[in-house]
Image: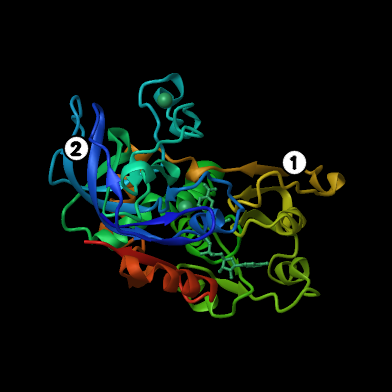
Amino acid sequence: MKGIVWDGKEASVATDLQLRDTRPGEVRVKIEAAGLCHSDVSVLNGTIQFPPPVVLGHEGAGIVTEVGSGVTNVAVGDHVVLSTLGNCGHCAQCDRGKPTFCRESLGKLSRPFTCGTGEDTKKVFQFANLGVFSEETVVKATQAVKIPDEIPLPAASLIGCGVLTGVGAVINRAKVAHGESVVVIGVGGIGLNAIQGAALSDALPIIAVDTNPAKESYAKAFGATHFICPDGPDFDLVEAVKEICPNGVDYVFECVGSTALIKTSTELLDWGGTVVMLGVPKMGAEASFVVANMYNDKTIMGCRYGSARPQYDIPLMVRLYQAGRLKLDELVSQTYPLEEFNKALDELHEGKLARGVLTLG
Ligand SMILES: NC(=O)c1ccc[n+]([C@@H]2O[C@H](COP(=O)([O-])OP(=O)(O)OC[C@H]3O[C@@H](n4cnc5c(N)ncnc54)[C@H](O)[C@@H]3O)[C@@H](O)[C@H]2O)c1
Ligand SMILES: [Zn+2]
Ligand SMILES: [Zn+2]
């Protein structure tokens, strides 16, 4: 079968991928659609260090083709959104509603794929416990969440990372309240979902910031009330935000992965304000801030995967979509066959996309 494999130097379409058998507690899924998130790009450029060879892709939706023994939450034929959390579902952290804290959910690498033949056969990792840029994958049953058949799978696929991360950061982690002010820096797939999460929370104003002026129309369509486009290294973002909110804002969501922007984010806060770091800078990167600037009850917080509880949040995102309160179709700027992966990468870099989606069905 086909899939996008990163060999440590380049990403290309492998046609000789094989997938091992489905084990107890696992589910085999035929992937129909998979979004291209910047975290996949970060593997290619070394920002996220992941051992090759690896099948990329961690934002996918598809149809269950086989269930291992003991699996009861999904059945063959079910449409599912896949979650990157390989959490166990029964430890203390899972039980207290914090599956992103499950020790089974992070850093456990799995290699269900192989490529090549004979002596050249190599085991291949699945990125983020998923590897959804492939025609089929196997995941733990807890990673597959059933959705209604009528939800278009390209739209549904984006729930798996971008929507849970962006909306979850606002609602689950920051818990933004009615009328609080929000800045979102970086209007990509993550930032757009932070914007729509802020709109769902009734935040006001919602100020979007992106160096690409083409992102203004996306930002406004997803609920931003203002758009700031820093047009060069001398642009004063603090000044520009304070023209709108003279005392600063209650929340800044950094959705780029820049340590310089994390520092700037602290300078945008009103007293009591919070920076939420969603972007992922290079492993080992350090950020700084002026300590005195934080005295007035300000906070900097990390947030992994929107502090999501996939079994609860994925169906909730679907219901919000069905109720017309969450935009998913509008996130899909372009679809590509697997063979056009590099075109999708180029168009992401050119800033043309909210999300590009690979369609495999
Ligand atoms: N915390 C998590 O769990 C989590 C999950 C998924 C992705 N991420 C991370 O979130 C970040 C964003 O991912 P994405 O898929 O939205 O990326 P993207 O490429 O779709 O969007 C990034 C946006 O940032 C803008 N940008 C770049 N430099 C900027 C600057 N200096 N000022 C303002 N805007 C700037 C770009 O123009 C682009 O619109 C990445 O670092 C990714 O690894 C984190
Ligand atoms: Zn992602
Ligand atoms: Zn657990």
Q: Amino acid at mark 2?
A: Val
Q: Is residue 57 shown above or below 359?
A: above
Q: Is residue 77 shown above or below 361?
A: above
**Residue 312 appears in the figure:** no
Disc marking residue 297: 1
Q: Nearer the viewer, residue 223 or 61?
A: 61
Give percent across and percent down for residue 146: 23, 44
State the SS at label 1.
loop
Q: Which quarter of the rendered picture does the C terminus lie within?
A: bottom left
Q: Which quarter of the rendered picture does the N terminus lie within?
A: bottom left
Q: Is residue 287 shown above or below 15?
A: above
Q: Nearer the viewer, residue 250 or 353?
A: 353
Figure coloring: rainbow
* Residue at image point 56% right, 45% down: 174
Q: Amino acid at mark 1?
A: Asp
Picture quarter containing residue 120? top left
Picture quarter containing residue 19? top left
Q: Nearer the viewer, residue 290 or 89?
A: 89
State the SS at label 2.
loop
* Residue at image point 30% right, 69% down: 337
Mark before the other along the chain sequence, 2 or 1? 2
Give percent across and percent down for residue 339: 34, 69
**Residue 129 appears in the figure:** yes
Give percent across and percent down for residue 342: 44, 70
- Answer left or right for 326 relative to 27: right
- Answer left or right for 176 relative to 236: left
Outermost residue on the front side: it is 119
Quadrant of the rendered image holding ligand 1: bottom right
Q: Nearer the viewer, residue 14 or 65?
A: 14
The answer for how far apart the CA atoms under marks 2 and 1 are is: 45 Å
Mark 2 lies on residue: 74
Mark 1 burial class by Cα count in 10 Å: few <14, some 14-19, many 20+: few
